[in-house]
Image: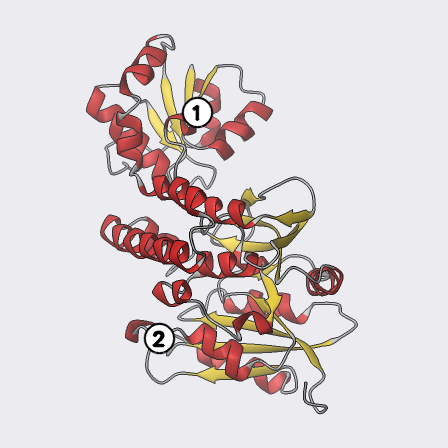
Amino acid sequence: MNAKNKNMVSIICLTYNQEKYIVKAIESMLMQQTDFEYEIIIHDDASTDSTVNILREYQSKYPEKIRLVLEKQNQYSMGRDTFADLVRNIATGKYIAVCEGDDFWIDDNKLQLQYDAMNEHLKCDMCACTGCTVSEDGEKQISLIRPQETSGVLDVRDVILGGGQFLVTAGLFFRKKMYETMLPFENVFPLDYTMQIKGSLRGGIYYIDKNMAAYRRYAGGSWTNNVLNNDSRLRQQWEREIAMLKQLDADTCGKYSQTIACRLKSYTPFEMQLASHRDEILKELKSAPGKAYIWGRGRRGRSLEAFCAKEGIKIEGICDIINTDIGHKSESGSTIITTDEVLQNADVIFASNRYAYRDLKKSEYQGRLIDFEKYMPWG
């Protein structure tokens, strides 16, 4: 490392039209308590709102800490992988931390803990931590992103099977030298999932079981809104992920073929997974009479709702922990109601995912509870 450079960690923050969120992201980076120097590199991809003005204000306050890379043309739309360029050509730290402009950190010791972990676990190229999904305003926690309940090394096979949502992106911390060489699979689809796999290949990912990073799942312009809720874009995403995994299989000479084959099942649409269990589901539902509600409005919840509509299964309403759009109709025509109303009135709740099922099991709800993720486990 250059003697003039004292930064041990480079934080890379990618942002685009995130004027509503960027302040909290930057403040969470600045609050870090460390015994080493770190820099904050913020790349703005030609925002059209006031994001750049906010960035310039912060740079003027912290000129020694914050570096800006401001694009005049949107690089994402041109297919350019700016993240890899930032790591290789701009970052000066030995380690790289990630925090996108609509995410933020919730522990001021995050960088120090991950820095210490990397220095202790020399066979690991990447460190991750527990994270959480939060409401758009960042005030309400929705669910934990927690691959296991103890700190330790995550095996590459678990990372492959986990998919891109196995770890929270804002919790990733890795050695810069990880980007000195690039395998072909990384160029097929350079996204968070790809980065996690790359970080696990040498010796696994060291995981710290502490909630230190937040992901705004419903942020405007987020991946959830742009891809997850758009069937056409989601199919395109899946096609690229499948191609990436097949190239990974070739790059690793078939070492993880069985794991990759198992992961490829995850690209089976939830509707098809439900249909394959149709008779079993209908039999179970016949044993659960009364007012039925769906808990969860994500992809699993919407697929379950469509399945019920197709099979003539009466649903009184649908809800999720965010409690937004109350009184409106869902895409399948169900009334969106509050979680409190469901808990008070439901004879049976269809939990669309394992998080909902787990939380409801811990609640005081006394009615029938059905775990529907068992019928659509892949995804």
Q: Please state which amino acid type lies under the numbered disc 2.
A: Arg
- Residue 186 image offset from top left, x and y in percent: 42, 65
Residue named by callout 1: 342
Residue named by callout 2: 80
Q: Nearer the viewer, residue 288 or 20?
A: 288
What is the count of numbered marks? 2
Is residue 60 at least partly visible in the picture?
yes
Residue at the spot 43% in from the left edge and 42% down from the top edge: 258
Q: Please state which amino acid type lies under the numbered disc 1.
A: Val
- Residue 132 image offset from top left, x and y in percent: 56, 48
Relative horizontal placement of residue 122, taking residue 304 as reference (left or right) = right
Residue at the spot 55% in from the left edge and 30% down from the top edge: 359
Q: Nearer the viewer, residue 300 or 18?
A: 300
- Residue 231 image offset from top left, x and y in percent: 25, 48
Q: CA distance from mark 2 to mark 1?
A: 46 Å
Is residue 334 at least partly visible in the picture?
no
In this rendering, the answer to whether 234 lies above or below 323 is below
In this rendering, the answer to whether 172 lies above or below 377 is below
